[in-house]
Amino acid sequence: MNRARLTPSPQDRARLLALHPALALSVRGGHFIALAVLFALAAFAVFGMWYLDFSARRLGTGIAQLFHFVTLMLPPDPGRQLPLYMHALGETLSIAFLGTLAGGLLALPFGFLAAKNVVSNPVLHFGVRRFLDMLRGIDKLIWALIYVTVVGLGPFAGILAIATASVGELGKLFSEAVEASDRKPGEGIVSCGGSKPDTVRFGLLPQVLPVLASQMLYYFESNSRQSTIVGIVGAGGLGLHLAEQIRILEWQKVSFLVLMMLLMVAVIDFISSRLRFAIIGRRPVAF
Amino acid sequence: MSHAVVQLPPEQIAPLARLYDEAVAARRRHTYIVAAVILVGIVLSCWGGEVRPAVFAANAHRLGLYFWNILPVLRWETLGADLAEWYWNLDGWLKLLFETVVIAYLGTVFGAIGAFCLCFLASANMMRNTLVRVSARRLLEFLRTVPEIVFALLFVVAFGLGAMPGVLALAIHTMGALGKLFAEVVENIDMKPVDGATAAGASWTQTVRFAVLPQVLSNFASYGLLRFEINVREAAIMGFVGAGGIGQDLVEAIRKFYYSDVSAILLLIIATVMIIDMVTERIRHALIGMDQSR
């Protein structure tokens, strides 16, 4: 039995084209544009590979090397360094926790200043927004590197780095939460004779506080990933040991450290997403 | 017109007031417990994170001093010369920035190709075999949980210094991140065209090409562009571990205290990221518009 007849016969095709000329034309035009875009993308990719000195030989030897490393990684084994690594894990958690908390607290005033319905002065509003953009635009690893040169090696630099970048990220999210809040509770309080601070305390805070808390929890999750890598530039935590063990080719320890990272991230994700659902229900944090 | 405030008799008010007090007390207890947990967390992490407030307070002014120092010296009379001195290596930095963008581009393209191949295996409606689906999902999860920079560290050892390990590290991570998003898009498609194609006797690849792709392509492109934005930021730090791009110069400037260079490079990075964000946002809105007008 012949089931496949997706391609119509030439006569059928001509008849269909005659019946629906507009449809056929639009499909062909779309095809042409799609092919042109695809060709441009591929051409730039080929140019990029040439520009960055890609070579098949290097790729081949590199992949062979990688497979060799993977065989050396099994089984994961911390050697005698387990207490040291557990301490580094504690450092990583501290960096994520304190960084997010400090960032969130510092972001609170910025969140209100950058909200249109709290501060109506456009110049101040614009300035605060751009300042937050700048804090956010610089990667956490760059902040970590800067703070390492300022406060020295160690987890404290990591805490400052995470906190600084979190101010930018959380400040923006907070301001959006404040802008999205309902004005009616505040009006109700004013109509009952409440003062301006009263409207903030009883009208605004109960609306935005759960949202802010869930956003902070979400950033705690994401920062716990970031805090594992700030150690690469010397800002404490697991990353420090990871970079070191990769450099001295201790592959079993490397795989153990990566496993520790994955496990930690999974546990924190689990706990924090449970807490988030308990606070605001199953809806995603705004992006 | 006057309203009389209705006063309930005391025996009716008393239980209501008691319930109200209990509810308020329960909330208060809740707040105290949360505050206590946070406090314990702070104390533990201060101990674990080697936070010394006294040392920090004594040296806090250095923090401000550093950010003051990295600002360039710009005088109004000699503005042109000062600017030229601040951006003394503009040509070299622009070249490195271009390299960074190319790294991000290639990482996104290769990652998107990998994600495209894996997403159909990881989506429940296109892959009935549970074993294949679950293993594809676990693979994607692993790829996106390990940070890019860790892959970059590994690849620098395996492939040698240069831009290639950076591209591969970004591609691997992108594959994990995009693969998950792509699979979600595929799971949300309208299944009627798929049924139609199957009924007409199409093979699996034909079904994907004619029934699935037209529905998902604009979403795929939009997610790919979003990832490109993220990858530009990530590519800027690949140089920290020797995997190409502008990061190498930035590390040097920060470590060797070339103050004005730090601000110059940082501003260049921020400007590049902003421009790329704006351009890709335009394209994404156009894509979404195209999707809705169809």
Image: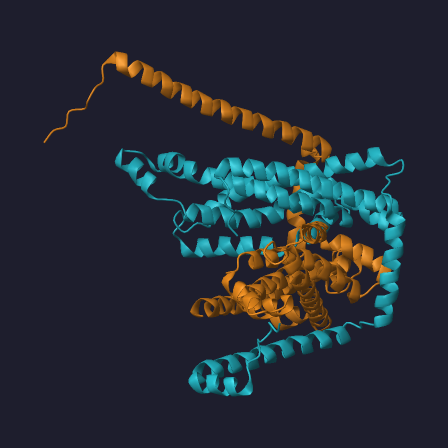
Chain colours: A cyan, B orange
> Percent x, y for residue A81?
86, 36
Find residue A20 and report its horizontal and vertical position in percent.
43, 83
The furthest residue to the front: A1
Q: Is residue B139 visible?
A: yes
Name the residue at 36% across, 34% down: A198
Residue at 52% in and 35% down: A278
Apparent side of residue B220 relative to residue B161 in the rendered image (left or right)? left
Label total for image? 0
Of residues A2 and B221, the one drawn nearer to the viewer in this rendering: A2
Q: Quadrant of residue B15?
A: top left
Q: Nearer the viewer, residue B159 or B44?
A: B159
Residue beneath the point at 45% across and 70% down: B294
Percent x, y of residue B256: 78, 56
Q: Determine whether B7 is above or below B167 in the image.
A: above
In the picture, measured across the screen, residue A145 lies left or right of residue B181, that is right
Residue B197 in picture, x, y percent from top left: 55, 68
The quadrant where residue B13 appears: top left
Determine whether B60 is above or below A12 in the image.
above
Q: From the image, which quarter does the N terminus of chain B lie in?
A: top left
Q: Is residue A158 left or right of residue A283?
A: right
Q: B190 above or below A20?
A: above
Residue B74 appears anywhere in the view: no
- Up-down: is B61 above or below B226? above
